[in-house]
Amino acid sequence: MISTPPMTAQPIDAPRPDAPRLLDRHLLGVARLAVVALDAHGRITHWSRVAAELFGVEGRRAVGRPLTCLLRFPPEHRGAFEPGAFTHVWCGTCQMPRVDDGRIAEIAWWVYPLRTDAPEGVRLVAMAADMQRLREEGPGVSVGDTSAAATDEELLRPMSGVRLVWVEPALVPTDGEDPAGLGRRLAALLRQSEAAAAERIASRVLAMGHPAVNLSVTVRLPIVPYRDLRVRPHAADPEAAEPQPPGRARTPVPIARPRQGEEAMAVWDRLAFLGEAGEHIGSSLDHLQACRALAEVLVPRLADFAAVELLERVASDDEPPGRVDEHTLMRRVAVVHDDTERWIDTVPRGQALRHPPGTPFVDVMRTGRAVHIRRVTRRQAERICAAFAARDLGPLLAGRALLVVPLIARGQVLGTCTLLRRADQPDFERLDLALIDELVRNAALCVDNGRLYRREVRQVRELQRAMLPADPPRTAGARVCFRYLPAGQAAQVGGDWFDAIPLPGCRLGIVIGDVMGHGVTSAAVMGQLRTAVRTLAGQDLRPDELLRALDGLARRLGDDCLATCLYAVYDPVARRCQLANAGHLPPVLVSPNGAGSVLKLPPGLPIGVGCGPFETVEVPVPDGARLVLCTDGLLERRDRDIERGLAELCERLAASPRTLDATCDAALGMLDCPAPADDVALVAVGLDGFPAEHVASWTLDPEPSMVGRARALAASRLAEWGLTDAADTVQLLVSELVTNALVHGAGAVGMRLIKCDSLLCEVSDGGHELPRLCHTDPTAESGRGLHLVAHLAQRWGTRRGDLGKIVWFEHPL
């Protein structure tokens, strides 16, 4: 398998001496290109015949319409087709449906923005090719001498004996010439009202770069004797390539030109170098490491000095890149030289700088095109050195060959790569420029991929942090401790969630779940489910009823919304725990004496499956017990199943100290590494119970005299607790709730007072209609009791009970 140099992707007229070469032979290619021209408003002014075939819409229907409205571009690529968005050529591929039949086509694009003074009002010219056809049939290829009499039909025949395994759009410099007659054919395709205007448009298009494709092909080649093709400097003698001692500057190595007989081997040597260098650059998702690797492979093979500068926004990873000018802050992130130590102080790594206008660095970032100065004059050196007021770079630049190449990825300029060769070395050749362009382009893509990767990691983890509880709630009779460990890889960050929800009656709701899948989508679904659980818990539903309602909500969110979930409600007064499971791991209950056991719960089906029964199980719990809930990331391992993992967890918890922090640490000790392969969520709850002397309850007969008796009972108990200051207000509120139960309720009336951080009063009856606040007319004789309760109490509410309803209020102490 070999990778060929960029191939011209347009019909050719005659061979050129400077055309791409393979094994000392000319390599030229043709392909069917669609040509589209847009005005300043993005409307189509020209639609070629190939464009009609490629996109399935005739020219008379396309001309005059905005291109972004006619074709359905992916959102990330729409900006490239808006005149004025870019100042340099954008080339890339995207998948889009055809207009006539909706068939998805993979299109290669070359988009050329023109200046505002372009003739005929054309502001943008775009060329397109069918990538699938190029891969299946290949472009027409001619190797060797090409006759000028060859027709397009002859050249457009499929490549015989060649299998393409990779095709990618690219650009090649034109050096101000008309390569292979593309300009004449492009002018003829545009069909402007004046031939001169079409020729001017074509010349401006070609000045920005020639459309080309990079190919990776499989062919049969003659074998040659083995030769070591490791990445190494071209040395004039064998000693030049030997490694230097650490801390010592490299000995300058002359960049030798191969002799004519060695040109074929030199081509293969450079191809091997390109492959190994690309692997070295792309070995990390760290954008700074990719820049350092780029500089290291360029020196001393292709240059004596290499420096990579990134936009400060890209280097610091604060925000995506934007427009660049002379005011844009840059940061030099990599410097490698094959010279004396004077570069270390003169051009330090990590320096922040702004380049003055008119320098090659600013021109490269504005135009997106490389700047090549064969020999830097003293005046040019002084102008470039203006950006470094405290350092004299003139002697280091004057007389050297200078090459500044932009780092461009997905149409955005990310920075620049600066290369220098000493005066005693040859200038950058055409093949050198092609190699450097390929390496810089790969490095730019690695930098941008790393930026997008880190942004996704940051977004997912920020989303998770925003949706997970920051601190455990403080509730009477229970203590909560939780831990969360995200997956070691961003692709594995998922939707594990947990929560602890205070409920009326000093109870505590505990939920833990795991959304199936990973990534941003799973994290977003996790946030929706967590919000839904908090909302449903506020309605004081039984655990099985809550899971049933959550399952219905998940099914309305979509077929991909699947999650396991375990919901438990702990009542410290009744010393019981109600649990319901939806396909999640069962919890572990650690008794006060340290014995751990797995609670046997009906497994249930995951949330979102539907039609699955959920069952509430009630478990008595002694004071001092601990309840531990976790997700499967803690227990799952290749060499251990879930059952064995739960047994090991019980053993670890039984041997751990009784504090909740120690309990969590003992459970996390089951992990093999600090960065788990999957998310881990862990919740430990201390079930302390509630002192019996802080609870008082009574059952009252439903008769009018019970109102006065309820007031007296409340006042007596408040006096025993030393809360006489709150007696008047509490008695008034008690009388209102008991009266409502007598008038609007049914059956016996129950009253309970609980002394904790605040005073809680609950009044229950057998009725099922929950009271609510309503508007009362000024002349009405009733209906203001709940308004009075809402005004005097710290909080109040209603909930369903086992036999009816419960109305409660809290009074601060």
Image (cartoon, helix red, strand yellow):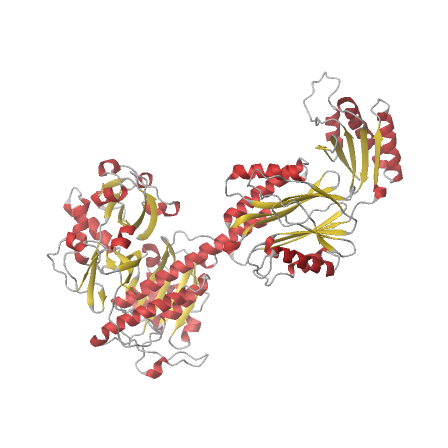
Question: Residue 621: x percent and y percent?
Answer: 76, 47
- Residue located 21% across and 76% down the image: 261
Please tell me in which quadrant of the rendered image residue 257 appears.
Answer: bottom left
Q: Is residue 466 above or below residue 283?
A: above
Q: Decide if residue 500 is on the left or right side of residue 699.
A: left
Q: Is residue 355 visible?
A: no
Residue 274: x and y, percent? 33, 67
Q: Is residue 699 visible?
A: yes
* Residue at horizontal 39 percent and vertical 63 percent from the top: 387
Q: Is residue 557 above or below residue 484?
A: above
> Is 812 or 522 nearer to us in this picture?
522
* Residue at x 45%, y 59% (from the top left corner): 315
Image coords of residue 730 (percent x, y): 81, 32
Along the line of sight, the residue nearer the viewer: 60 or 600: 600
Q: Number of numbered discs present? A: 0
Query: At which x and y percent is residue 411?
Result: 36, 52
Residue at the farthest top position = 779
Question: From the viewer's perspective, is 437 left or right of 284?
Answer: left
